[in-house]
Amino acid sequence: MTQIRERTVLFADLRGSTGLFETLGNAEATSLVTQTVGLIAQAVDECRGRLVKTLGDGLMAVFESPNDGVLSAIRMHEMLERVVARGRQQGASPSLRALRMQVALARGEVVEMNGDCFGDAVNVAARLLNHAGDNETLITTEVLAGLPTAKKLRFRSLDLIAIRGRAEPVHVHVLDQAIQGDVAATQFGEVQHAVEPDGIRLVWLDLDRVFDIDNMPIILGRSVQATYCITDARVSRSHARIDWHAGSFSITDLSYNGTFVRFGSSGDVVSLKRGSCTLHGNGVIGLGSPPVDATSPIVSFEVLHFADTEPHSFGHTRSRG
C-alpha cells in the first residue's frame, strides 16, 4: 500500500569502517560494523522512529516529529562514543578508535511504499551527508522549525548550501558542539582572537577571491555548485567546508582523501580526516594530498582584518568575490 505522509527523514553513516577491514580482516570487520550499526539503530526505536533499512555501514529511518528525529541523532552519537571509549579502555585497534559518524535530517512529504520511502526529503537527507563533517549532525530549516525553542538554540545556521541534483539551495543548520581535537590549538598554541577577522582570502591558480563572514559557509570542491570550485580530478565534489563561528574561521574535511592545512610558509602539516581545525594567519590547504607536491591542488588562504592589514601577495591578481 502506497501512502504519502509528512515525515522527518534521517540518514546516518559510519566513517572509518574501511580501516577496520584493512586491520581486522573481512569477517571480523563485517561483524563489528554490523553490530555497531545495530546498536545505533536502537536509538530509532527509543525515539519512536521506524528503521527503513540499513545501508552497509549506515542506516535510514523516518520519524513523525522533527524532535524525535533530532533526539535519535543525539542518542546515536552518544552510543557510538561509548563504543569508541570502551575500545580505548580495552586497547582496541586504532581503526576502531577512529570510528566516526555523520547524521543528516530533512523533512517533507514522503512516499511510503513496500516498506521503503521516496521523495525530495529522502534525497535531500541522503545528499546532505556529503556536507557533514566528523561527528556532525546537519538538519534543514524544515526540521529546525519543528523543534522546541530550547533545542533550536543548540543549532547554528550554515546558511544556504547547494545540494547535488537540486536546483534550489537548502538552508542547513549544524548541531553545535566544541570542535573535537582542534589540532591547530594543540600543535600551535592557543589561537588568540582579540580582534575578530573580517574575511578570508582563497587563491588557487588564477581563482583569487575574498569572502567576508556573510558569505559563510564556503564549500571547496570540484562540483560546479561549490562556492569555491576547484576543477581537479583529485578533489571531491564537496571536499571541505569553511565556517564562521564564535569569532573565528574553521575548516572541516568532508572528503575520503582528507584535507591538509599548513600554517605559515614552513609550519607542520595538520591532517584532517573528517575533522576540523581553526584557520588563523595564513598558509595553504592541500585537498586530497599534503601540500608538498606543487602539482597537487593547493589553495592558499589568508585570514583578513580589513581595517588594519594588507593582504599577502600570493603572486596572483586579486578580485573580490
Image (cartoon, grey):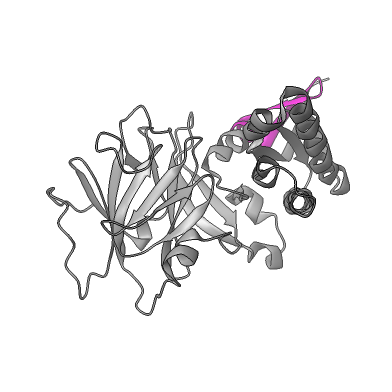
**Quick one: 152 or 243, which is closer to the camera?**
243
Pick the quarter of the image with the N terminus. Answer: top right
Residue drawn at (32%, 30%) of the image: 232
In the picture, measured across the screen, residue 175 lies left or right of residue 245, that is right
Kindly identify the residue that appears in the image at 46 percent across and 48 percent down: 271
x, y percentage for residue 88?
74, 52
Q: Is residue 74 above or below residue 101?
A: below
Pick the front one: 49 or 189: 189
Residue 319: x %, y % from top left: 17, 51
Q: On the image, which quarter does residue 34 sit in?
A: top right
Whole-percent x and y of residue 162?
45, 40
Residue situated furthest front in the rendering: 91
Is the residue 278 above or below the residue 221 in the image?
below
Q: Quadrant of residue 293?
A: top left
Residue 276 appears left or right of 41: left
Residue 158 image position (x, y, % from top left): 49, 54
Q: Nearer the viewer, residue 200 or 93?
A: 93
Q: Give the mark count.
A: 0
Asked if the stretch drawn in magenta spans residue 265, the answer is no
Question: Quick one: 163 or 291, which is closer to the camera?
Answer: 291
Span shown in magenta: 108-123
Is-magenta flag for residue 117?
yes
